[in-house]
Amino acid sequence: QPVSAFRDEDGVAPDITTETYLALRLTVENWRWAGVPIFVRTGKRLPARVTEIALQFHEVPFLAFEGALSRDLRPNMLVLRIQPHEGISLKFGAKVPGEAFRVQSVSMDFGYEQAIHATGMDGYTRLLFDAMSGDPTLFIRTDEVEQAWRIVDPYLQAWAEPGAGLHFYDAGTWGPHIAELLLERYGILTRELVLAEGVPGGFAALYDSLTQLETLGIARRGYFIEGLGGAQFALPGAVERLRAQRALDTSPPLVLAASDPAQPYGAALPWPGEPGERRRAQRVAGAFVVLVGAELACYVEAGGRGLQTFVGGEALRAAFRALAQAVRAGQIRKLEPERVDGEPVIGGTHEPLLIELGFRAGPRRLTLSA
């Protein structure tokens, strides 16, 4: 139901500047939490009364399920619900039932009320009961209180200065969050995307909020993607994924079994090439693939008698070299290619390179053993 804003309450000055919402980024300078940002958010007149701690896990540098397959997939998260519904929730990815291959985030929940069939006391009742019982378990120590004030007091002093400025939000909402919602949707936010969303006032209306998110460490400002405009704000996770993708371009080739769950082609991604164009690659036991910069470079048929190539030049040379190394390392027992892309290997364009890599020539095939 609609609720009145703080400035509309009886007895409250209409120009009061007392803060009612806080979004704060903190860090803990020790080995356990080094590099892990801690975001604290609290406010009045929010849509719900809830206290929870959410631990968001790092995203992997290479996500096997890209594009539309993972549109509804969020980072794994462990949520500890403090009140009012005490419990724990684990959010992870699961395949959506059906013929299509698509994954989305789901939750596995534990609730005290449902599992233990007991209703806990509310906050103040529990507080008074523990105080009378002499139980300090849920109380904080004096040094923790003092440290909390050392963190908060500089902000209170800064906000009390003339011209410090406030970011207003409507009562009954989660705070001034339109800029953050757009960042969550796109990862990288530009002037053109804001205009496409039809935000009143355009990019200029969100600029102050985006700058505040940058100050809090929630967003970064920079020129991340060429051609998307000079003013770009991005979530740290989006920037790291871009860097990881760039790093994949120079990473060594990877040889995987075609049926390996980490191998996306034939499952999350279609095999390259048009149907009927060549003998189709399959996710079968005994077959292998070589990925160069996350791109499929070569497919080895089960038994090692046929090779299919999907790239050329240095990328293909690197893929063949990785295959030879996989044989010598014992990952592949033997390769005896008779055909490459459906053509005889003996006398073909790829024979000199394979011979250079250690393959022995026979009447009909090349051979390389561990």
Image (cartoon, rainbow, N blue to C red):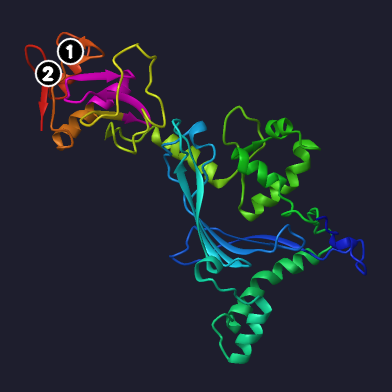
Disc 2 packing (10 Å; few <14; some 14–19; many ≥20)? many
- Tell me, yes or no, whether the highlighted magenta stretch contains residue 41: no
Q: Amino acid at mark 1?
A: Val
Residue in front for this viewpoint, 85 or 49: 85
**Residue ID for mark 1:** 345
Q: Does the residue at mark 1 contact the one at mark 2 (Cβ under 8 Å)?
A: yes
**Residue ID for mark 2:** 366
The residue shown at (66%, 76%) is 123
The residue shown at (22%, 23%) is 301
- Tell me, yes or no, whether the highlighted magenta stretch contains residue 300: yes
Q: Is residue 315 left or right of residue 19?
A: left
Q: Secondary structure at mark 1?
A: loop
The residue shown at (20%, 30%) is 286
**Residue 297 to residue 83: above or below:** above
Residue 56 at x, y percent in the picture: 51, 54
Q: Amino acid at mark 2?
A: Leu
Q: Looking at the image, which residue sits at the far front?
A: 117
